[in-house]
């Protein structure tokens, strides 16, 4: 399973995280916006689509920088999660799909309840930002 996600970094160096809604696997955990890459999409196209669907943001391909990946078993599947950073977008993030959304300094992400794949990604983000 190929999943792409973005660490959106604002001008105060805060990162956007979203809370998974009730009724979904891992409900209540905090994660980076993103989702599955669909057939025929490049990873960047998929991430641009997800950021529009989930937050109403318009992002250009050149604003996405690969920063880290995670490779983890997930139930009966295997998750390959590609994380990008993004400092530039058009529009203001509105929470359209998640249970909640917040902007946090990267150091605070370490204290959040996140899916297992995200914990090493946060460590890599700390080094990269
Ligand atoms: N967007 C996102 N997904 C993540 C992260 N970490 C992580 O393990 N995932 C997993 O990657 C998958 C993302 O796919 P998705 O967002 O399209 O899937 P979903 O379960 O929310 O909904 P769906 O299957 O009904 O579309 C989920 O299984 C999710 O739990 C993360 O930081 N961001």
Image (spheres, rainbow, N blue to C red):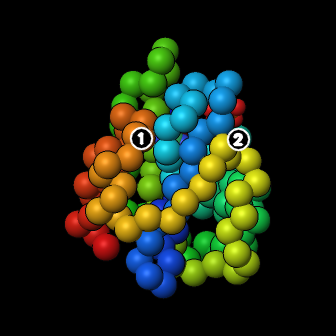
Q: Secondary structure at mark 1?
A: loop
Q: Is residue 14 above or below residue 47?
A: below
For disc 2, the marked residue is: 39
Image quadrant of ligand 1 equals top right
Residue 37 rendering spot, x and y as whole percentages: 63, 45
Q: Examine the rendering and report whether any part of residue 65 can be seen.
A: no
Quadrant where the image shows the C terminus: bottom left
Residue behind mark 1: 114
Q: Name the element at disc 2.
A: loop
Determine the residue positioned at 44% across, 64% down. Answer: 104
Asked if disc 1 and disc 2 are in contact, CB closer than 8 Å, the reply is no
Q: Is residue 11 left or right of residue 89?
A: left
Residue at far bottom of view: 11
Give neighbour class at mark 2: few <14, some 14-19, many 20+ (Cα, 10 Å). Answer: few
From the top left corner, tell me how far across and down residue 71 is, in percent. 36, 37
- Which of the marked residues, 1 or 2, is nearer the chain's N terminus? 2
Q: Nearer the viewer, mark 1 or mark 2?
A: 1
Report the label total: 2
Q: Nearer the viewer, residue 18 or 49?
A: 18
What quarter of the picture does the N terminus occupy? top right
Q: Height in image: 59 above or below 78?
A: below
Q: Mark 1 and ligand 1: say if the CB distance to the nearest ligand atom is below 8 Å.
A: yes
* Mark-to-mark CA distance, 1 and 2: 27 Å
């Amino acid at each position: 399973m190929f999943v792409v996600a973005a660490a959106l970094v604002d001008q105060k160096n805060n990162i956007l995280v979203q809370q998974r809604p009730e009724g979904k696997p891992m409900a209540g955990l905090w994660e980076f916006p993103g989702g599955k890459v669909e057939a025929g999409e490049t990873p960047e196209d998929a991430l641009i689509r997800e950021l529009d669907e989930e937050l109403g943001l318009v992002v250009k391909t050149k604003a996405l920088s690969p920063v880290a990946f995670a490779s983890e078993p997930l139930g009966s599947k295997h998750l390959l999660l590609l994380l990008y950073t993004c400092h530039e977008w058009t529009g203001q993030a509105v929470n359209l799909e998640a249970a909640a959304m917040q902007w946090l300094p990267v150091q605070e992400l370490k204290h959040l309840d996140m899916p297992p794949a995200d914990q090493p990604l946060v460590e890599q983000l700390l080094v990269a930002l």
